[in-house]
Image: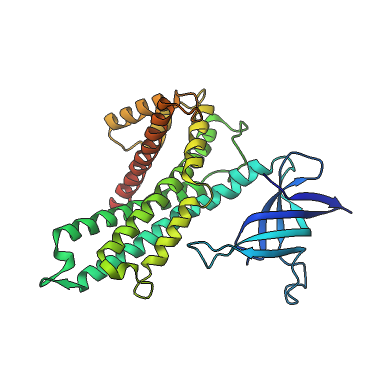
Amino acid sequence: ANLLEAVEEGGVWRLYGTKFFCSATHADYCIITAKPKGSEKVALFVLPSWLPGDKEKEIRNGFTIDRIKWKMGTSELTTGELTFNGAVAYPVGPLDKGVANVVGIVLTYSRLTVGLSAAASMTRAVREARKYADLREAFGLKIGQFPMVAGQLAAIDHTAKRTTAGAFKLYRDFLALEGGLKGGLTNDEPEAARKKRFDIRELIMLQKLAASWDCTDVIRMAMSIFGGHGVMEDFSSLPRLYRDAAINELWEGPRNVLLTQMHRDLQRVADWYKPADFIENNLAGLDEARRRDLAKEMTELLSHSDLFHLDEKTIEICRRWDAFCHNFFHAYQDLALQEVEKV
């Protein structure tokens, strides 16, 4: 529920009410949603933390920070509970398109950065684990010489590399998107452009889902190579990276929300964008038989009406859809890595 109310007073919009979750409360500006008075629609606003000349005086723009959340990770990025009492804010886009704009533009861009963050954290974790394995000795051998450890290092190294390659490929295509991000699914472009925009939208959600999940797995495996030192806060950065990675799994939409959203999105466009075409456009370099199998499975999963009925069939469809999304995006990442390795 959006409990924040926006009231236009003398040509200036002011916000009244509370927000239970506000991230980056130390920032000079924030993007915030609120309901204009008398409307059930949600609008999007930009809100400066300080009005001109007030930052030096430590006078905030009509709001108080009531409580800083005690969360397990990203501690340097403060999350708090705020109360607004006439804070000056400025509308962004039409007042009835706040949800579409915050999801289609703000959250989409933020989700894109989660993929890059995951790639960076994995790369750091693998580097730390490899250096430790080259240093630590047990039973007369460097632990990196044990086949079990060598295999684990190779596995997490591959995951880090494919995540990095996939993140940069997706970011490249995002930057090339003509007209930038838009709120919601639109019909004001040629079909080819609509499909490309839709691809980027879904791939960003898929990356957020897969990369954030893989990140905790990679860091946990890296920690295990350190043994007891892996959980010592004063020995390496891995415990902090692990806590931050767990936050990124939930950041900008937990996995169940994203899985459901993608299922609905792909059903909504089925009349002009078939599953086989979606597979073909995004996994063009994949083996033809595997593309055919993925298209067949995707079509079957999307034929299920929705993911909201609590019955055995829907539960099984949900399980398969979760696995399918990870398999699909891992294939996308592997193709991106192959592209890099050919250079």
Where does the image place residue 232, in percent across and percent down from the top left?
35, 71
Q: Is residue 141 above or below residue 100?
A: below
Residue 177 shown left or right of residue 243 in the figure:
right
Q: How is the image coloured?
A: rainbow
Q: Residue furthest front?
A: 311
Q: Nearer the viewer, residue 282 or 330?
A: 330
Q: How many marks?
A: 0
Residue 124 shown left or right of residue 59 in the figure:
left
Q: Is residue 17 visible?
A: yes
Residue 115 shown left or right of residue 12 in the figure:
left
Could you say which quadrant of the image residue 327 lies in? Answer: top left
Residue 323 shown left or right of residue 108 in the figure:
left
Q: Nearer the viewer, residue 337 or 140?
A: 140
Q: Residue furthest right?
A: 10
Could you say which quadrant of the image residue 69 lies in? Answer: bottom right
Where does the image place residue 218, in percent across and percent down from the top left?
33, 56
Where does the image place residue 120, in percent across and percent down from the top left?
40, 61
Q: Residue at x 31, y 28 (%)?
A: 293
Q: Nearer the viewer, residue 298 or 36?
A: 36
Could you say which quadrant of the image residue 46 lies in? Answer: bottom right
Q: Is residue 269 visible?
A: no
Q: Nearer the viewer, residue 242 or 209?
A: 242
Where does the image place residue 165, in percent across and percent down from the top left?
36, 52
Q: Residue at x 48, y 43 (%)?
A: 205
Q: Residue at x 73, y 74 (%)?
A: 58
Q: Is residue 155 above or below residue 328?
A: below
Q: Quadrant of the N terminus?
A: top right
Q: Is residue 94 above or below residue 304?
A: below
